[in-house]
Structures are given as C-alpha cells and as structure tokens.
C-alpha cells in the first residue's frame, strides 16, 4: 500500500465505484450501507460514477437501483454522462479480425462486446435480454466458488468449441473482446497483438481493449467534460483492471478482498463489501456520516 495519503479530508467531487467485488458482495448484493452512502454523497453534491469492465447494457439494473446516470464501462472504452455518450474508443476492425482468427486457431472461446450486445462463443453471451437478463443482474446468490471454478475451467477448455461466425463481429462496433484462455497463452497474445491491452480477470479469461486504454483514460475523458481536476476524485476497486484507475485519481482505495497487486499501489485499503467497505472508506474521508 502507498502510505502517502493524498488530500485526506478535502472536498472531492467525483467518486468512482467498480462493481464486482467492490459494490457487490460475493452474494451479488449491494449492501444497504453502500446504497445509503451513495445517496448521502448526492445530497452533498458529489457525483457517484460506476467504473466497470462490464458492457453498458449489463449494468442498467444497478444504475437504476442506485439512480446513477454517469458510468464508465468496457474498461474505459465507453463513457456516458447523464445519458450522453461523451467518449467511445472501439477496437480496430483489423485487431478484432485477428483476435477472432487467433482464438479459432487456438480453439478458444471468445466474446465480442458492443455497447448493447455481446456475441460470440463464450458463455458471457448468455442472458442479454428479458427475464434471464434481469435474473443475472439481480440474482442475490452467487454460485459457490467451487462451481465457478469448474465453470471457468470448462469455458477455458478447447473441447466442444463452436465455430467463430463472421456475424459475431463484422459490421459491428466492438469495444472489448473476452478470450477464454489460460495463462500459458499470455505471452503469445501480448507479442502477437502489440496494439491491444490485455487484463486477466481469472486463470481462464482475459479482457482485451485498445492499447493505452483503461478505466483511467475513461476517467480523464469524464473530468475534462465536467471541468474538474483529477485531484478531486476518489476511486474504489478490487481487481487488476482497477490498477490504472487507483493510480490516476486523487485518492485510490482498494477493497480488503482485492488483488494483492492492487492493494500494493493503493493510497488506502478499506474493508470488504460484506463488511461495509464502501461506507467505511467514505467515512474515513469525511464524505458521509
């Protein structure tokens, strides 16, 4: 952890929240303490912002439940402020085609993420519409970790991989790809795709976005749009895709349940979501009661 606490007890204007492992508990619930803390921020004129690797349409239930209109999605590739898209940075057509070919050659599942739909051979394409979509976003009980481990091993395996059809990505704006691949392929992808940025989120899957992009870039685009300084921002996160974000903001706070690499660069560490980490972190900055 970075022991230098930057700007404690100053008045911050924007607070960024990752979703999974930060706002959401292991049981996929937003604690009442976090909900109330976000409402208290609004009462003080402080803007809460979602910053996630998820696609926009995969967070609309959460946005509605918290009454949040500003969000950074797809790991910084797509930024919306009060209903207006203020920044978007899709992967190049060439990069997407080459990623599709590499995944097919290596017999790996892949998802092609647009702003309103995900297509591909990955299981993350399930539950995009109707009741199943709502169930996935609202489900209060997460599958046991052992089940999730077996599931991710399955999607990361080369068995029964369906063909990657051209309509999954052709004539579509693709902001992010998700490739289900084991760590032994990391060096191959990084060498073969110098124009892309890879972030591993479990032993069997990686997010792929444009080189030089991250949640931090999305944050920079947002603060330029609203006209505030980066020193007036706070961010909460738990994963490897939160590293650049916590390094960029005025106060970067890692969750206790977060990755060791993230906690090492954070300005402070708060409790887990289950132990009211959002509330405690904001209270420590004197931002909420």
Image (spheres, rainbow, N blue to C red):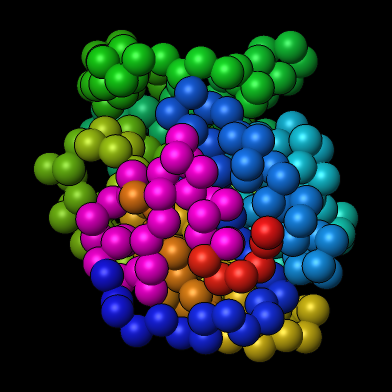
Residue 103, percent from left and from top: 33, 37
Q: Residue at x 41, y 56 (%)?
A: 270
Q: Would you say 196 lies left or right of 9 here?
A: left
Residue 112's place in the image compared with 263, above or below, is: above
Q: Residue at x 27, y 70 (%)?
A: 1
Of all residues, the one furthest to the front in this rendering is: 289
x and y percentages locating residue 152 in the rendered image:
31, 23
User: Is residue 9 shown in magenta?
Assistant: no
Residue with the most extreme left position? 184
Residue 221's quadrant in the figure? bottom right
Q: Mark yes or no: residue 228 visible.
A: yes
In the drawing, does residue 217 fall left or right of residue 274?
right
Nearer-the-camera pick, 14 or 137: 14
Residue at image position (44%, 64%) is 253
Residue placed at 70% from the left, 37% from the top? 62
Q: Nearer the viewer, residue 218 or 191?
A: 218
Quarter the C terminus occupies: bottom right
| Vertical comparison of 258 with 118: above or below | below
Image coords of residue 160 (percent x, y): 31, 11
Along the viewing direction, whichever of 220 and 108 lies nearer the viewer: 220
Question: Which residues fall within the magenta stretch?
Answer: 257-283
Provide residue 216's location: percent of width, then percent of height.
52, 71
Residue 58 or residue 111, whichever sits in front? 58
């Amino acid at each position: 952890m970075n022991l230098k606490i930057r700007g404690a007890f100053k008045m911050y204007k924007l607070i960024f929240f990752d979703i999974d492992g930060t706002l959401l508990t292991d049981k996929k619930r937003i604690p009442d303490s976090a909900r109330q803390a976000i409402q208290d921020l609004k009462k003080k004129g402080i803007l809460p912002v979602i910053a996630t690797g998820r696609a926009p349409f995969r967070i609309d239930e959460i946005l509605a439940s918290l009454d949040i209109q500003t969000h950074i999605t797809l790991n910084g590739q797509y930024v919306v402020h009060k209903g207006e898209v203020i920044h978007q940075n899709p992967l190049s057509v060439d990069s997407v085609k080459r990623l599709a070919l590499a995944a097919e050659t290596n017999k790996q599942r892949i998802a092609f993420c647009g702003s309103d739909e995900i297509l591909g051979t990955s299981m993350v394409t399930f539950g995009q519409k109707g009741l199943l979509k709502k169930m996935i976003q609202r489900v209060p009980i997460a599958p046991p970790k052992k089940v999730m481990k077996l599931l991710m091993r399955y999607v990361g395996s080369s068995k029964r991989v369906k063909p990657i059809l051209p309509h999954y990505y052709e004539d579509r704006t693709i902001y992010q790809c998700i490739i289900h691949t084991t760590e032994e392929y990391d060096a191959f992808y990084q060498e073969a795709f110098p124009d892309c940025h890879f972030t591993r989120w479990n032993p069997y899957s990686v997010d792929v976005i444009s080189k030089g992009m991250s949640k931090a870039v999305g944050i920079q685009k947002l603060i330029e749009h609203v006209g505030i300084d980066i020193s007036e921002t706070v961010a909460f996160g738990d994963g490897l895709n939160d590293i650049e974000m916590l390094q960029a903001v005025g106060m970067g706070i890692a969750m206790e349940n977060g990755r060791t690499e993230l906690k090492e660069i954070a300005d402070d560490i708060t409790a887990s979501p289950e132990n009211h980490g959002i509330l405690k972190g904001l209270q420590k900055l004197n931002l909420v009661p």
